[in-house]
Amino acid sequence: MRNIYRKRQKFKITFIVISLLMVGVFLSVSDKLVQDLSKEELNKMEIWAEATRLAASDTNTDLGLILKILQSNSTIPVIIVDEEGRIMGSANISNNDSIYLDKKYHDYKEVGNIIEIPIDENTKQYLYYDDSVMLKYLALFPYVQLGVMILFLLISYVALMNSKRAEQNQVWVGLSKETAHQLGTPISSLMAWMEVLKMNDMDKTLLADMEKDVNRLSVIADRFSKIGSSPELVPSDISQVVVTSAEYMQRRISSKVDFKVDISEVKGCVKICVPLMEWVVENICKNAIDAMSGTGTLKLILRQEDNLCCIDIIDSGKGIARKNFKTVFRPGYTTKERGWGLGLALVKRIVEEYHGGRVYVKESELGKGTTFRVELRLS
């Protein structure tokens, strides 16, 4: 099966998996850095606590070295308290107000960063400390990094998908224009030969059938030529469009398909490009017939609902799973062995982009059938 949609799904899954792996690696590295810095700060505080103990209890120690150790801490906030919880000193805290220090002491105590300082056999002090500003920033960095990466990946994904969509549109337009161009020459030649046959008293019944086929080819070429450019929308009788499409389909479908047409009066006109709108109805009908494998019931209903003109195409085919209601309109999605998955994608483009309408799966049940609806705004 030539299913472009499946390839696109695989691409999306691969993109997401790679993105998640990248995010996981960056978060893991950042978390390792935070843990290492936290351990380093704990080691510094243990040395600082030991220097504080020596300064308070041992007069034979080199006070210059102790002072150098105590002064080396310029980043980690510290509060020292006695066994009664009275604050004995602090470092790297900008506000020395007693109320503020007491609040900080309780905050540090709640966090649990505490080191016991045994001054002598009967006296103990306790060192409470907080993470340095650098460690706090580093702890927040993974979340900032995660947000930036998600934003970057989203932008990259959207840009990539838009680029692929633009490239796809160019392919569609180029293919349509080239098809119309290639059909133009043989159609002109066939028209000329028909005139020759008329002058030679060819069977008029046979000529009439040939003329219908040539005119049909002209309509097809005209439709393809309109894809990719802004078609001229003119006020038209939508009922006549539906009737014409229905008559064309009835002549070409199997007698095993019970084709019913129900057209109600529509008050007002719809601004449409008639050849393209006929193509929409015919395309959906063809998909419905394929879904029924050439046997079943096909209903074409035209109704007016408020200021909307609604065309329902109802089949008794195999149905569509709810999860695929939107997927069926994506280019490349097909369930047919030799399908390209472009029919309904073109339908959606014509209805929504060119006519400002809406086309969707109104309802469907597996094994029972599907209802497609086309909605167009009345003038």
Image: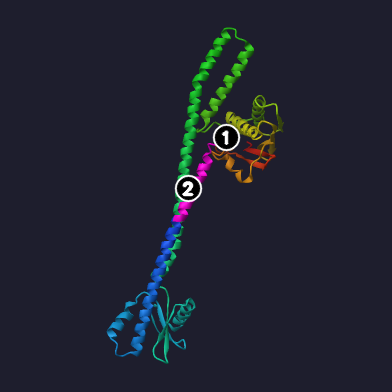
Distance Cα–Cα, label 1 vs label 2: 31 Å
Which of the numbered marks, if any, corresponds to residue 31? Answer: none
Q: Picture coordinates of residue 366 (x, y %)?
A: 67, 42
State the SS at label 2: helix
Chain-order first, disc 1 or disc 2: 2
Q: Main secondary structure of the magenta part?
A: helix
Residues rendered magenta in the picture: 1-21
How many numbered marks, from 0 up?
2
Residue 95 visible here:
no
- Front residue of this view, candidates 89 and 206: 206
Q: Is residue 229 left or right of residue 133?
A: right
Crowd around label 2: few <14 · some 14–19 · many ≥20 (10 Å): few
Q: Is residue 276 left or right of residue 30?
A: right
Q: Is residue 144 above or below residue 209?
A: below
Query: What residue is disc 1 on?
Result: 337
Q: Picture coordinates of residue 1 (x, y %)?
A: 54, 37
Crowd around label 1: few <14 · some 14–19 · many ≥20 (10 Å): few
- Residue at position x 43%, y 67% in the image: 139
Amino acid on which the number 1 mark rests in the picture: Glu
Q: Picture coordinates of residue 233 (x, y %)?
A: 57, 32
Whether residue 90 appears in magenta in the rendering, the answer is no
Q: Find residue 338 and report its image quarter.
A: top right
Quadrant for the C terminus in the image: top right
Query: What residue is disc 2 on?
Result: 158
Amino acid on which the number 2 mark rests in the picture: Val
- Residue at position x 33%, y 89% in the image: 58
Q: Picture coordinates of residue 329 (x, y %)?
A: 57, 40
Residue 25 visible here:
yes
Q: Is residue 83 above or below residue 375?
A: below
